[in-house]
Amino acid sequence: MSKTTMTISSQFSLILALGALLTWVVCVPTEVRADDPSQRMMRSGQPGHHGRAMPDFVGHSLHRLLRHQKDLGLSQDQRAKIKAITTDYTKTRIREEADLKLAEVDVRTLVHDEKADLAAIETAMKKSESTHTALRLDGVKALRAAAVVLTPEQRGKWRAIRMERHGSGGHAEGPRSRAYSDEPMASPHEDAQPDEDSDEPDQIMAILHDLPDREG
């Protein structure tokens, strides 16, 4: 083999070796990240909910309430109060969902750590559940606050509208654009439409029925 051929062969081998090394450098971190629970959680979109974003039943209900303000005959004062309730709830939900995601990061990290103490895992899980409960409870509070703003007659109309909507399979309103430009922005998860089979809409109806005779 000539000297020139040997030189070319050596250079070619060096190129192959560098290529293999570069491939390893690029691929290994990807494989490691694939096993990282926090990375899987971020890809899932919402921790602890099988990769699905938490439906914002409360936010959707409050915004529908504002969209039906003419049907319900809401006064300017009532609209202002409900918009304030909606805005406050949206801000609260954003904060608590962030807390929930952080809590789930801790849970998943500890669960995948073979050396993690069971007591620490239990504490992290309880913190996550507590945060989730607080999020749901704040939703109930917001709905009750909005219901109190309505008069008994308006609550009756709102119950009828919701019953009609559920009776038609949840599509009575159809696709609509925002009717009021000053309506508060929805939460970041408003695009995740609520599942009509969930018990959350029934809880909303129960809240409306809890205040049949109370003046708004």
Image (cartoon, rainbow, N blue to C red):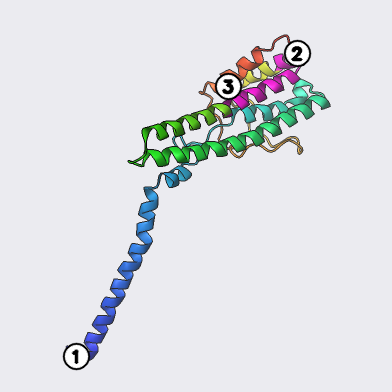
For the C terminus, which image quadrant? top right
Q: Quadrant of residue 63?
A: top right
Three-letter amino acid code of the residue under disc 3: Pro
Left or right relative to 102: residue 176: right
Viewer-side residue, 42 vs 112: 112
State whether the magenta stretch is mostly helix, strand or loop: helix
Point 75% across, 13% down: residue: 153
The disc at residue 2 is 1
Q: Quadrant of residue 200?
A: top right
Give the image location of residue 180, x and y in percent: 76, 35
Q: Which residue is mark 3?
A: 201
Q: Which residue is mark 2?
A: 153
Give the image location of residue 45, x and y in percent: 50, 41
Within-10-Å neighbours for mark 2: few <14, some 14–19, many 20+: some
Residue 184 visible from this viewpoint: yes
Point 54% across, 26% down: residue: 133
Which segment is the magenta one?
Answer: 135-157
Three-letter amino acid code of the residue under disc 2: Glu
Q: Which of the two discs, 1 and 3, labels the residue nearer the N terminus?
A: 1
Give the image location of residue 61, x and y in percent: 64, 26
Within-10-Å neighbours for mark 1: few <14, some 14–19, many 20+: few
Point 79% across, 29% down: residue: 80
Residue 167 visible from this viewpoint: no
- Say which element carries label 2: helix
Q: Is residue 150 magenta?
A: yes
Q: In this rendering, which labeled residue sits more in front, label 1 or label 2?
A: 1
